[in-house]
Image (cartoon, rainbow, N blue to C red):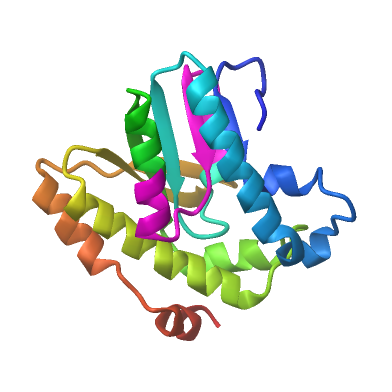
């Protein structure tokens, strides 16, 4: 959890929490993943009750998609609470959505999808914070599945879909625009992949 660069956004990030845990080693980041996720969920519940901010953003997207960079670029100065994670399951997302609604706040999803999974995979391999390769395949498959499920089952929740790309020597972001919800759903259906399909594509 942190406020950054003078902005007003409150960011809850399991990856940031990991750095505070005793014995944390970025080369074995997966060893503290469950504990940091538990703390992040607990912090999220507490902050929802304590903070006056009405707007909540749940980040979505596979590992090394550019989510944190997107937050740093566009959301730090917004009066929002941000849960920076991959949003891997509908159950987990539903629990968070229910918690937001229980305190009469507004939730939206900001999903970052890389234009090139191979580029994203290379970025994943080069990170200081290391996971097994399966983490990349799993988070990209599961986050897309969850996003589609939310689009279908929660039609009232706004979904902002962002494409990340690397152009002119820097990471850039562009929002997909859809005239109606069904167009978004059809788009999401067309970008569903299994873990095996992602592995075969990038390796």
When the figure is inspected, residue 93 is found, relative to residue 27, above or below; the finding is: above
User: In this rendering, does residue 109 appear at all?
Assistant: no
Q: How many labels does the image show?
A: 0
The picture quadrant where one finds residue 12 is top right
From the top left corner, tell me how far across and down residue 112 is, in percent. Answer: 42, 49
From the top left corner, tell me how far across and down residue 41 is, in percent. Answer: 56, 44
The magenta segment is: 69-95
Residue at position x 59%, y 17% in the image: 7
From the top left corner, tell me how far across and down residue 98 is, in percent. Answer: 34, 40
The picture quadrant where one finds residue 185 is bottom left
Horizontally, residue 94 falls left or right of residue 22, namely left
Location of the N terminus by quadrant is top right
Residue 72 forms part of the magenta stretch: yes
When the figure is inspected, residue 127 is found, relative to residue 38, above or below; the finding is: below
Q: Which of 104 and 108 is in front in this view?
A: 104
Residue 41 forms part of the magenta stretch: no
Horizontally, residue 5 falls left or right of residue 98, namely right
Residue at position x 88%, y 50% in the image: 22
From the top left corner, tell me how far across and down residue 11 is, in percent. Answer: 58, 31
When the figure is inspected, residue 120 is found, relative to residue 163, above or below; the finding is: below
């Amino acid at each position: 959890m942190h406020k950054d660069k003078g902005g007003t956004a409150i960011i809850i990030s399991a990856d940031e929490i990991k750095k505070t845990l005793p014995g944390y080693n970025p080369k074995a980041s997966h060893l503290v993943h469950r504990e940091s996720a538990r703390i992040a969920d607990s912090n999220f519940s507490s902050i929802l009750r304590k903070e006056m901010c009405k707007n909540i953003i749940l980040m979505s997207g596979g590992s090394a998609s550019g989510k944190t960079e997107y937050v740093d670029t566009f959301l730090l100065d917004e009066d929002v609470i941000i849960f920076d994670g991959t949003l891997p399951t509908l159950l987990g997302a539903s629990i968070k959505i229910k918690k937001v609604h229980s305190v009469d706040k507004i939730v939206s999803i900001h999903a970052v999808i890389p234009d090139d999974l191979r580029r994203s995979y290379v970025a994943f391999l080069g990170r200081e914070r290391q996971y097994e390769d399966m983490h990349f395949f799993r988070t990209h498959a599961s986050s897309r599945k969850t996003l589609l499920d939310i689009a279908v089952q929660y039609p009232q929740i706004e979904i902002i879909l962002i494409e990340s790309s690397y152009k002119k020597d820097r990471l850039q972001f562009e929002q997909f625009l859809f005239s109606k919800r069904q167009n978004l759903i059809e788009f999401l259906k067309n970008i569903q992949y299994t873990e095996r399909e992602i592995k075969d594509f990038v390796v």
